């Protein structure tokens, strides 16, 4: 089971709801979470990641395991030295749930996501 699913499951437990209930309420296909849990899928789409982050009122970075719960609660970003190395493969899995070449379309979606994060956090230095 990966970090993303582990965090989602823990947030569901904290709220006293099932993953199935959370999926229905957040508008995310339950099959995506089942595939994530079993390893058939190693990430979620940008759209689903954003839906879940909004549902739980946490950052996508927290769901991905890039920040701690304390950082997420305080609205802090991890220190640059604490950030894990992120590879092109990580981006493909996290945002597109797949493998293969990072297409121009995928790259443009990543750029839009970065703009979204910067705007949400008042610009990142």
Image (cartoon, helix red, strand yellow):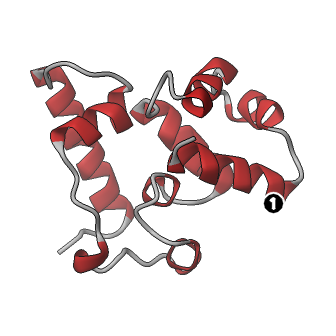
Q: Which residue is drawn at 89% across and 52% down?
A: 16
Residue closer to the observer: 100 or 58: 100
Classify residue 105 by image quadrant: top left
- Among all residues in the image, which is located at the extreme right? 16
Residue 17's x, y, as percent?
Answer: 87, 45
The quadrant the N terminus occupies is top right
Judge left or right: residue 86 versus residue 58: left
Identity of the residue drawn at 31% across and 70% down: 122
- What residue do we see at 61% from left, 33% from top? 37
Q: In which quarter of the image is residue 93?
A: top left
Could you classify mark 1 by the number of other residues whose Cα lies within 10 Å: few (under 14), some (14-19), or many (20 or more)?
Answer: few
* The C terminus - image quarter: bottom left
Circle 1 — which element? Answer: helix
* Residue 24 drawn above or below residue 67: above
| Disc 1 target residue | 14
Where is 69 relative to 23, above or below? below
Name above or below for residue 11 compared with residue 22.
below
Which residue is pictured at 50% across the width and 21% down the height? 40
Where residue 46 sits in the image (x, y, percent)? 40, 35
x and y, in percent, of residue 98 in the image: 33, 22
In this image, 55 relative to 42: left or right? right
């Amino acid at each position: 089971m990966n970090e993303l699913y582990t965090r989602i499951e823990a947030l569901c437990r904290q709220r006293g709801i099932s993953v199935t209930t959370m999926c229905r309420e957040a508008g995310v296909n339950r099959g995506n979470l089942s595939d994530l849990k079993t390893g058939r899928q190693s990430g979620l789409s940008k759209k689903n990641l954003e839906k879940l982050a909004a549902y739980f009122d946490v950052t996508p970075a927290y769901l991905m395991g890039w920040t701690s719960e304390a950082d997420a609660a305080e609205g802090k970003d991890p220190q640059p030295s604490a950030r894990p190395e992120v590879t092109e493969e990580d981006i493909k899995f996290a945002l597109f749930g797949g493998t293969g070449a990072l297409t121009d379309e995928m790259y443009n979606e990543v750029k839009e996501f970065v703009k979204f994060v910067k705007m949400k956090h008042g610009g990142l230095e």
